[in-house]
Image (cartoon, rainbow, N blue to C red):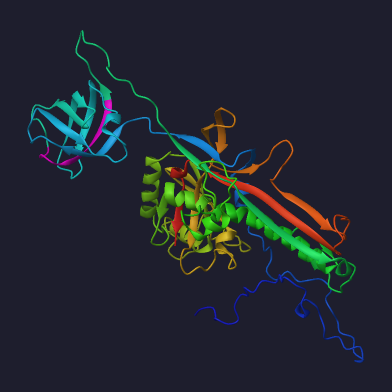
């Protein structure tokens, strides 16, 4: 059995650019002797239609006064190379290795120094050694070591090995370390985008009463139809303030968007069009799960092992769609030895009036994971029901991280996700709204209308994107 394909949910937007006959009841016949029994108030058949609140839950907002937002994120503390070629034969007591990792831009930046002790492991699993570094050629990237083991090198020549530093050792009466290391940060930037919307109504229509009592999600009610349209424009704009921060992408060079949106007044070095939204940042700098939802503990263990290799943030929140939420519930229920029948999720009192709870709000396995339904991913007018390019969930680390803020000129604590909006002492562009025209209290022009304008200029900063996981459909 399955849900019938018809009737289905409606996707046709209720908002129109002009007032049409379909917006009003027109079938009254005053020559009919029978009076219809009418419901004056609109019925909210789609419930709360707004999708915003995600960024308000996990982030913060703070001002910025520049076309470019820049921040620095810490690099790794310890040194490890995973693409190192063994230049010497097996059983050699001393050996040369060439570091080929593409993570370093030049051999001169190898962070291995004479006197350090290293662990060397064959990537094919044939053996490992421990050795002390006796020479480093910073021009060619060749490292010379002397093995501690009497049997010498445990793997063959030209093996690809992993090498990491675990300490150092020097003979008595020798000089100290001959080189020093300089900390390296990763620098990221983003630019704000300008969002606008507007609603206009003629003065005559503002004075027209309706028989339907309209209502919106923000609690506005009344018998004036234009109030509904104005409030829904505001609600729609509020949603776009969030969804634009989630979905925004930078315009590629020579793209149509770059040509249409580039500004000659943009700051030097900035991308003229687009911005880095949350999804873009995580897909390019974070962790991506593909091929369906993780539905077993083994699947989640692979996610946890990846988090171990990243920032190892203790608490994380999973914002998921309905299918992913059910998959997590079923996975957790399966851990109960009596859960095969699906009736013993959690702990119950066996009361005859008990409402069976078949869901979970979170779990702990290595880290704490809290689960929250994300309406944006379920809404059929937004991310819900996409045939391609869908997202099933997003893992967001909780708390804040320390970054160097170039505006403040010092390290500052920032939420992993936060919004920066343009503002100065004279202009605040976080959320601007103003009325023009000659109706509704405005007296700015001779046009017989009230025009409500909305504007915001903002971007989202995704700090430590390596700690996020996006679950693509």
Q: Position of residue 268 (x, y in %)?
A: 53, 41
Position of 30 with respect to 123 (left or right) is right
- Residue at image x 38%, y 33%? 76
Pinpoint residue 37: horizontal percent, then vertical percent.
86, 82
Residue 320 position (above or below residue 182): below
Whether residue 216 is visible: no
Q: Quadrant of residue 96?
A: top left
Q: Nearer the viewer, residue 226 or 68?
A: 68
Percent coordinates x, y for residue 115 in the rendering: 23, 20
Q: Nearer the viewer, residue 225 or 366?
A: 225
Task: Count all numbered tags in the image, as a single digit.
Answer: 0
On screen, 127 above or below 303?
A: above
Residue at the image position 58 percent from the left and 82 percent from the top: 6
Above or below residue 83? Residue 133 is above
Q: Is residue 179 above or below residue 340?
A: above
Q: Is residue 27 visible?
A: yes
Question: Is 299 included in the stretch rendered in magenta?
Answer: no
Q: Residue at x 56, y 36 (%)?
A: 414
Instruction: Examine the image and state in which quarter residue 93 appears.
Output: top left
Q: Residue at x 76, y 61 (%)?
A: 231
Q: Position of residue 318 (x, y in %)?
A: 51, 51
Q: Which residues are magenta?
A: 155-166
Report which quarter residue 473 is drawn in. bottom left
Q: Nearer the viewer, residue 242 or 447?
A: 447
- Magenta stretch: includes residue 157: yes
Of all residues, the one furthest to the front in this rendering is 264
Q: On the rendered structure, is 186 left or right of 167?
A: right
């Amino acid at each position: 059995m399955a849900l019938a394909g018809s009737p289905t949910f409606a996707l046709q937007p209720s908002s129109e650019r002009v007032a049409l006959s379909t917006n009003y009841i027109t079938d009254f016949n005053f020559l009919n002797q029978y009076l219809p029994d009418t419901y004056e108030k609109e019925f909210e058949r789609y419930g709360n239609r707004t999708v915003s609140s995600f960024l308000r839950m996990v982030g913060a907002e703070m001002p910025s006064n520049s076309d470019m937002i820049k921040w620095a994120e810490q690099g790794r503390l310890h040194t490890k190379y995973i693409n190192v070629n063994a230049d010497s034969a097996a059983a050699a007591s001393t050996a040369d290795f060439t570091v080929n990792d593409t993570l370093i831009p030049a051999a001169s930046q190898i962070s291995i120094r004479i006197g350090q002790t290293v662990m060397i492991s064959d990537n094919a699993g044939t053996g490992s050694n421990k050795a002390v570094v006796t020479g480093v050629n910073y021009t060619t990237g060749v490292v010379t070591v002397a093995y501690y083991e009497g049997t010498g090198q445990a793997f063959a020549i030209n093996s690809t090995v992993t090498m990491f530093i675990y300490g150092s050792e020097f003979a008595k009466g020798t000089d100290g370390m001959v080189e020093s290391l300089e900390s390296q940060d990763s620098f990221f930037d983003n630019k704000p985008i300008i969002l606008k919307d507007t609603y206009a109504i003629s003065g005559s229509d503002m004075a027209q009463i309706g028989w339907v009592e309209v209502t919106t999600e923000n609690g506005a009610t009344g018998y004036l139809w234009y109030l509904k349209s104005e409030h829904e424009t505001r609600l729609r704009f509020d949603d776009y303030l969030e969804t634009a921060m989630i979905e925004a992408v930078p315009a590629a060079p020579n793209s149509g968007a770059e040509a249409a949106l580039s500004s000659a007044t943009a700051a030097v070095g900035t991308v003229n069009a687009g911005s880095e939204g949350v999804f873009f940042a995580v897909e390019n700098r974070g962790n991506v799960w593909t091929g369906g939802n993780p539905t077993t503990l083994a699947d989640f263990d692979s996610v946890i092992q990846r988090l171990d290799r990243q920032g190892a943030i203790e608490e994380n929140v999973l914002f998921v769609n309905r299918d992913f939420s059910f998959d997590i519930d079923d996975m957790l229920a399966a851990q109960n030895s009596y859960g095969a029948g699906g009736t013993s999720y959690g702990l119950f009192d066996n009361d005859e009036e008990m409402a069976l709870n078949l869901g979970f709000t979170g779990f702990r396995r290595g880290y704490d994971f809290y689960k929250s339904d994300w309406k944006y991913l379920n809404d059929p007018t937004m991310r819900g029901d996409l045939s391609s390019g869908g997202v099933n969930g997003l893992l967001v680390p909780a708390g804040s991280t320390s970054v160097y803020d170039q505006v403040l000129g010092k390290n500052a604590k920032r939420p992993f996700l936060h919004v920066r909006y343009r503002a100065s002492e004279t202009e605040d562009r976080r959320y601007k709204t103003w009325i023009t025209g000659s109706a509704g209290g405005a007296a700015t022009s001779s046009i017989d209308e009230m025009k409500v304008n909305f504007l915001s200029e903002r971007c989202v900063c995704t700090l430590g994107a390596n700690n996020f996981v996006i679950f693509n459909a």
